[in-house]
Image (spheres, rainbow, N blue to C red):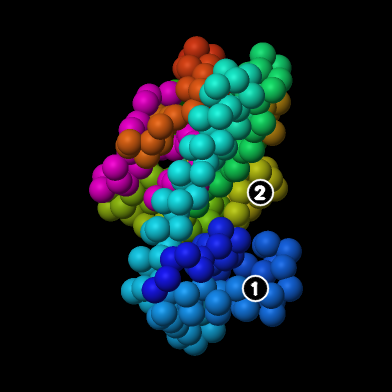
Amino acid sequence: MNPRHLTLHQMRIFLAVARHGSFARAAEALHLAPPTLSLQVKQLAEAVGQPLFEQIGKRIYLTAAGHTLADACRDIEERLERLVEDVAALQGVERGRLRLAILTTAEYVVPKLLGGFCAAHPGIEVAMLVGNRETLVQRLAQNQDDLYVLGQPPEHMEVVCEDFADNPLVPIAPPGHPLAGQRAITPQRLAEEPFIQREAGSGTRLTTERFFAAHGVRLRTRLEVGSNEAVKQTVAGGLGVAVLSAHTVVAELALGDLVALDVAGFPLLRRWQIVYPRGKRLSAAALAFKDWLWDHRPTSLASLQPTDE
Ligand code: PGA
């Protein structure tokens, strides 16, 4: 292998193909013509002297040489990012870049806090991705962002977790539901109702399923939908009950569009954490935002109280 023949452009293309598992999707994401992209990957494979991908069915996978190259490319990308940050740091916190990835539940809290932060530091360029637990854990494993607002990361991950705020889960129903206003409903009774669930990969869903499994009951999922908003709308529409983060339903509970049910064992108490890979050197902008989040963290949630009919 002759590394002098590798270019940064080729490495970025290669990482995009590896990430998307598809030449076509990587070409689309990078706005490149597919033949241009294939040529670059071919030249890269020639420089490495070994095939980088193998095709199984419709999907392509990295070979052992491909994995080794991907690790090296990520190291190089990270080093270049650090260079950008180091140069920015020379100009102080006011000129940095900040890449955030937050859970869909934190979408109801963090963007508001980000507004104040950006107003106080107008020179910082911010990108914020909102995703479910699975998406964020994958991005964290690949060190794609500066900071994550996440629940509990998987135990095997080498990360730093700093406590942020409560993220309790509450059972909700449409107003006028037969269980609304009842006291100390058992989990078994709630599980008799048709459930609206988030998509697989959602932390809300994982926690909910674990809770009911621990009580020896299986949920009857009537519908699976891909966002907290869609869950709320289908519950309000009378299709079933659901368990959601209390942060996502503050407005609906206050307006009476949804009611919180009094179910034994709820709220399920969880915390959001501010997470980043252990050993990562946080930029001045990331450090400043981390402090900002802590200083402005939400402390109370009125919507934890079950609704009286
Ligand atoms: P999610 O959010 O359901 O979008 O993954 C997870 C959480 O709040 O734990």
Judge by depth and name the residue closer to the eye, 307 or 143: 143
Can residue 72 be seen in the rendering of this structure? yes
Q: Mark 2 belongs to which amino acid?
A: Ala
Task: Inspect this view and state whether residue 103 appears.
Answer: no
Does 93 sit above or below residue 146? above
Q: Nearer the viewer, mark 2 or mark 1?
A: 1
Q: Is residue 87 above or below residue 233?
A: above
Classed neighbour count for the residue bearing mark 1: other residues with Cα under 10 Å, few (<14), some (14–19), many (≥20): many
Q: Nearer the viewer, residue 88 or 224?
A: 88
Residue 248 location, quadrant: top right
Vertical comparison of 83 with 40: above or below: above
Q: Give, as a single range, the part of the protein colored magenta.
A: 139-164
- Compared across the picture, whether 36 is left or right of 284 comes to right
Looking at the rendering, in which quadrant would you find the C terminus? top right
Instruction: Please check the rendered image and state whether residue 122 is part of the magenta-colored stretch, yes or no.
Output: no
- Which residue type carries mark 1? Leu
Q: Which residue is mark 1?
A: 37
| SS assignment at label 1 | helix
Among the two numbered marks 2 and 1 on one chain, the one whose residue lies closer to the N terminus: 1
Residue tagged by mark 2?
230
Q: Is residue 152 magenta?
A: yes
Q: CA distance from mark 2 to mark 1?
A: 37 Å
Is 156 on the left-hand or right-hand side of 192?
Answer: left
Tell me if mark 2 has few (under 14), some (14-19) or many (20+) residues whose alpha carbon lies within 10 angstroms of its own.
some
Residue depicted at x 30% and y 46% = 157
Q: Nearer the viewer, residue 66 or 163?
A: 66
Position of residue 166 relative to residue 38, above or below, is above
Residue at 66%, 43% (x, y): give it: 229
Q: Is mark 1 within 8 Å of ligand 1?
A: no
